[in-house]
Image (cartoon, rainbow, N blue to C red):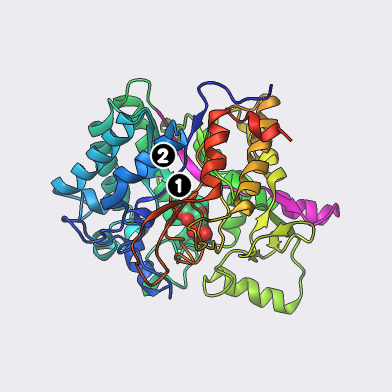
Amino acid sequence: MKVMPDNFLWGASHSAYQYEGAAQEDGKKLSQMDVNNYNTGFSDASVASDGYHRFREDIALMKECGFTAHRFSFSWSRVFPDGVGNVNPEGIQFYDEFIDELLKNGIEPLPTLYHYDMPMALVDKYGGWIDRQSVDDFTAYAKFMINRYKDKIKHWITVNEQSIIVEFWTKKNYIPEEYLQNPQIKYQINHHMNLAQAKACKLVHELVKDGKAGAAIGYSPIYGLDSSPKNMLAMLNAEDLKNHFFLDIYFKGQYPKGAMSYLKEKNIAPTILEGDMDVIKEGYSDFLGVNYYASKCVKYPDESLTEIIDAKSNLSGKKGDMGAYELMPDFYQYLKNPRAETNDWDWTVDPTGMEYLLRDIYQRYEIPMIITENGYGAHDVLTEDERVHDDYRIDYWKTHLKSVYCAMELGVEVFGFLPWSFVDVLSTSNGYNKRYGMVYVNREDKELLDLKRIKKDSFYWYQNVIKTRGACLFEE
Ligand code: BG6
C-alpha cells in the first residue's frame, strides 16, 4: 500500500501578522506589514483571524484533524516592540502559551523567526533591512527566541521567502521614498538577510541539542516557453537568478557565478564585505522549507523598443514590480505558460511542478525538505447550512500530495507537509477575498462578523489523509 512514513509530519502553516491580529495589543507595536496593509484597499492586519484570542480553539481543531506539527511565525515586534531593547512580557507570554498548547495536544511546533514583519521601529530608525545594523538586531532577537524555546523546539525556520521579498521588494518591505528608484536595494536587503539567516542557523546549531535549521523559500520551477535554444537559455538564466541565487547560499555558501555576473554588469549587485561569505558558510542549513504554489514560464527577451523601455522601468522598481511578467533585459522574460491552467487569481495550477521541483532540488543539493506552504486561494462560499464545499482545494492538495509521494518514491527526502493554511488568514495581496484555509473564518474582508470557525469539506478530507497516512489519495 502507498503510505507516507510513520514519522512524516502532518499539519499546516500560518504567519503571525496574517493570523494573530491584536496588532497593537498588550504592548505589541506595529510591524512593517501592519503598516503596508493599511494601504492595500483590502482588510488590514489589525484583527486578521483573531488568533491572538482564539488560538486554543484553533489548536483543538488541529488536534481533531490529526495534526502532528504546525508551522507559525513569531512576531518580532510583539516580543521586542522596538525591535531591540526590552522584552515585552505579555508578548512572550503569548508564545509560551501558544507553544505549550501545541505540545499539550501532541503537535510539534515549527516556528519561523521572520515572515515579512520587520518592526516598524527599526524601519523608522534606519530603514529596516536596508541597513546592516538589521543583521545584528535580528541576531539578538533570534538568540533570545532560540534560547527561550531550545528545550521545546527542534526544527527552526529562519526566514520566510527571501525570493519573494526580492521579487516584490516594495510590497514585502516598507521602503522609504528615497530608495524606491534604486533596484540595487533589493539585492542588498537580501544579502543582509542571508547574513541574518546564517547567523540564526549557527545559533540553532550551538544552542539546541540536535537542533535543525533552514529557511523556507518561495519556489517556482521555471520552464522555458519551448525547446528553442534561446528560450532554454532564458530558463537557465532565470533558474540562476530566481532559484539558485537563494539555494546556493543556503547549501553551498556562495552566490551562483552567472547570476552575480549579470547583476554586476547591470550595477545592481549587493555590496559584500570581507568576511561576509565566511559567515554565510558557517551558518549552513540542514533542510529546506519549500513553499510551492505555482510554476513559472520564461522566454528569451525580444529586443523590441517597448520591451527595452519596460525593462528599464522594471529595473528601476517603478513598473513590472509585481513580478508576474518580470523582464530582466538580455536574461529572461516571464510570460503566461500557454500550456498550464490557472486559478481565479491567475496563478498556475501545476501539480507536476511539485514533483519536478523536489527532484530538481534534490538532484542539485541532496538535502531533506519539508513542504512549508502549498495552497489554493479562492473566493469560498459559505452555504446557508454553514458548509464550504471547496472541492477545488481538495483537488489541488490531492494532486500536489501525490506528486510529493512520487518524488519520495524516487528517493527524495521529504519529511512533512504543512500546507497554507489551517484557518483562513489574511492574504498578503487580497485580504479575506482570497481564502486558503481548511477552516472558514466567519468574517468579510471589511466586516468582522463573529469570526466563528467553520470546518470546510477540505478539513474532513485532510483528516482522512492524515488518518490513512496518505493511502486514501490513491483509492478510487
Ligand atoms: C506565500 C507567503 O508567499 O504565499 C504567505 O509566505 C502568503 O504569507 C501566501 O499568504 C499566499 O499569497 P497571497 O498573496 O495569496 O496571500
Up the image or down, 290 lies above or below 415; here it is below
Residue type marked 1: Phe
Magenta residue check for 129: no
For the residue with label 2, is its CB less than 8 Å from the closest atom of ligand 1?
Answer: no
The structure residue drawn at horizontal position 58% and vertical position 50%, both measured from the top left corner, is: 260
Magenta residue check for 230: yes
Q: Residue furthest front?
A: 385
Q: Is residue 123 left or right of residue 275?
A: left
* Location of residue 305 in the rendering, given as x and y in whole percent from the top left corner: 73, 78
Would you call the spot at circle 1 few (<14 residues within 10 Å), some (14-19), or many (20 or more)?
A: many
* Location of residue 299 in the rendering, given as x and y in whole percent from the top left corner: 76, 60
> What numbered label is drawn on residue 284?
none
Q: Is residue 458 left or right of residue 449?
A: right
Q: Is residue 254 visible?
A: no
The structure residue drawn at horizontal position 35% and vertical position 66%, both measured from the top left corner, is: 449
Up the image or down, 218 lies above or below 63; here it is below
Which quarter of the figure is the N terminus placed in? top right
Pick the residue in front: 35 or 235: 35
Would you call the spot at circle 2 few (<14 residues within 10 Å), some (14-19), or many (20 or more)?
A: many
> Mark 2 = which residue?
62
Find numbered disc 1 in the image and state the secondary structure of the residue it sits on. loop
Residue type marked 2: Met
Pick the residue in front: 87 or 293: 293
> Mark 1 = which residue?
422
Which quarter of the figure is the C terminus placed in? top right
Find numbered disc 2 in the image and state the secondary structure of the residue it sits on. helix
Which stretch did the figure color magenta?
212-236
Up the image or down, 220 lies above or below 210; here it is below
- Would you say the residues marked 2 and 1 are in contact, meaning their CB atoms lie under 8 Å apart? yes
Q: Could you tell me how far apart the alpha carbons at marks 2 and 1 are, in whole angstroms?
A: 8 Å
The structure residue drawn at horizontal position 84% and vertical position 52%, both measured from the top left corner, is: 229
Q: Does label 2 or label 1 sit earlier along the sequence?
A: 2
